Image (spheres, rainbow, N blue to C red):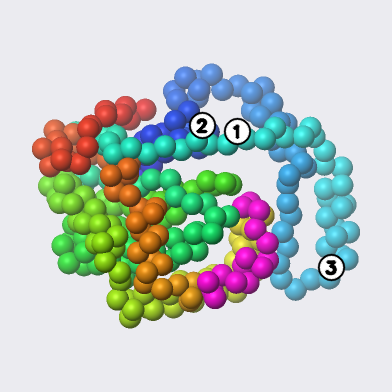
Amino acid sequence: PGTLATAAFRRAIYGDHSYGRLLATPEQISGLTTDAVRASYEAHATADGSRLYVAGMFERDAVLDATHGAFGGWSGDERAALPPPSPTSARAIHLVSREGAEQSTLSIGLPVPHPGDGDYVALAVTNSLLGGSFYSRITLNIREDKGYTYSPRSQIVAHPGDAYWVELADVTTNVTGASMHEIFSEIDRLRAEPAADAELEGIQNYVAGSYILRHATPGGILDQLAFLDLHGLDEAWAAAYTDRVLALTTADIQRIAVDHLRPDEMTIAIVGDADAIAEEIAPYGDVIAVPSS
């Protein structure tokens, strides 16, 4: 259900762009041939645009020699640029029906600024405060207080030049509508009134600390290098990240919520028992039936 909800959500905001095609169709699978696989590999697995990242304790010249020896003959045609996406979002419910489902799987969100945008760091902190950490508002509300779900979370999913924010949750079927109400209420509350200084300070310390810990291992360094490359960012962006996080104010977070987390434009994808939840989800938008395959 999580995969089906994500597929319906991404199809809704990206349409027929490759970012919106998460799952292959039965026709594509049945029509796949070894020649098609070979052609795809030759078109995309080329030296053009590829990167090799190395982190750890090593001798630079030895690594370069080994790299040239292993990859020096790698060639291939220049890869065609991926067409840029044109994401859109509108308040509607994209519903994949699963008769008898005991849970409803929710994906609620919309396109937001990408990592190269000046608001991205503040958006990352806003996400952690709202739904992206264990002590975030939505998590405390629908998990700890209401008991509607076990593992809700929000996240920012970024592609080159593009990103979206989404709240994810598996909720008990009979509280599907109530869960949506609480999620939107928390978004509205953050837009309507600034967070307390102490709440923001705790989230800032969490985000800054997690950032430092995440990039303190060779694997984390590789992830960071790939992230910077993918989004056209430089080392100065990475070096200034924690300072930018800690400099944010409650007014900054409220502005981000107002500017970028607009409930009336949020796409909603649900995988659940359509008949059982029809009445409770009706107030949240027109329902668009989505096939499960």
Dot 2, crowdedness within 10 Å: few (<14), some or many (≥20)?
some
Q: Marks 3 and 2: in contact by CB < 8 Å?
A: no
Pointer 2 or 3: first along the chain: 2
Where residue 59 sits in the image (x, y, percent)? 84, 70
Residue 67, above or below 107:
below
Q: Which residue is mark 3?
A: 60
Q: Is residue 131 above or below residue 268?
A: below
| Nearest the eye: 5 or 266 | 266
Tell me whether circle 1 and circle 2 mark residues in contact (CB < 8 Å): yes
Give the CA distance from mark 2 to mark 3. Answer: 41 Å
The image position of residue 124, as x and y in percent, is: 45, 62
Residue 234 locus on image (x, y percent):
68, 62
User: For residue 235: magenta?
Assistant: yes
Which residue, given by chain and number where applicable, does mark 2 sit on? Answer: 17
Query: Horizontal placement of 189 versus 11: left or right?
Result: left
Q: Which portion, as a residue range, is magenta?
A: 230-244
Question: Which amino acid is tagged 3?
Answer: Arg
Helix, strand or loop for the magenta stretch, by majority: helix
